[in-house]
Amino acid sequence: MKAWHFLRKSKKLGYRDGRLVRVGHTFKTSDEIIMCQSGFHASVNIMDALDYAPGPIICRVELGGEIIRGDDKCVASERTVIAMADATNVLHEMACWSAERALKRIKNPDPRSIAAIQAKRKWLLGEITDAQLDAARDAARGAARGAATDAATDAARGAAWGAAWDAAWGAAWGAAWDAEWRAQSRRLTKMVKELL
């Protein structure tokens, strides 16, 4: 079964194992495999793998031997790395892309949020310093805090709408979240495959 797995920059296994991961090498265990406890983990969906990422090194892996499938990850007695790359810049670019998609759904987004994305892209190209990027991020956080306060006030006013509104909103939000998650998964998979 093919899946995705992230590593730290050191390219070493975690959980006090410390062995160096190399393309083409198969790690095996004869221990009982237990989800979240023992064995070699990976996720079929790249976004699920990203949730568990300890660092930016992306690996395309083949799971073998005994395999247990969970909701968002698998554990196996064998894991072979097929391809590996440092996805640092891809992950930063993916964050910019996702943020831009979110801002497109807002009427009149705060210019500080837009500037923060532009600053991140300039930083990726080496056109601005870490300090300049931090300043743009801090300004965007100020915008986000203001928006959160406004949203909390609106939510307090709207509490009278009751459970019917909450249920309808929850269903719409769930569908929108699922659609966005799938779009992000497709985009990140494409970007990483081009990197590998």
Image (spheres, rainbow, N blue to C red):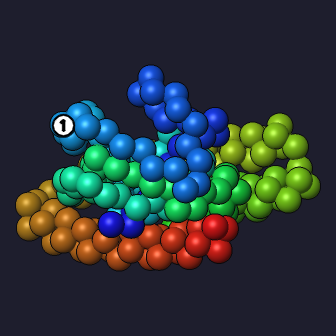
- The answer to whether 14 is drawn above or below residue 93 in the figure is above
Residue 63, visible in the rendered structure: yes
Q: Is 171 positioned to the left or the right of 61 in the image? A: left
The residue located at (31%, 71%) in the rendering is 178
Residue 160 at x, y percent in the picture: 15, 57
The residue located at (65%, 56%) in the rendering is 85
- The answer to whether 42 is drawn above or below residue 181 in the figure is above
Q: Which quarter of the figure has residue 45?
A: bottom left
Residue 172 at x, y percent in the picture: 24, 74
Residue 62 at x, y percent in the picture: 40, 61
Label 1 SS: loop
The residue located at (20%, 65%) in the rendering is 170
Front-lying residue, 65 or 89? 65
The residue located at (78%, 45%) in the rendering is 133
Q: Mark 1 — residue?
A: 32
Q: Which quarter of the figure has residue 116?
A: bottom right
Q: Is 3 positioned to the left or the right of 31 in the image? A: right
- The answer to whether 191 is drawn above or below residue 163 in the figure is below
Front-lying residue, 84 or 118? 84
Q: Is 14 positioned to the left or the right of 34 in the image? A: right
Residue 96, visible in the rendered structure: no
* Amino acid type, mark 1: Glu
Residue 89 at x, y percent in the picture: 70, 57
Front-lying residue, 36 or 187? 36
Residue placed farthest to the right in the image?
A: 127
**Count the marks: how many?**
1
Q: Quadrant of the N terminus?
A: bottom left
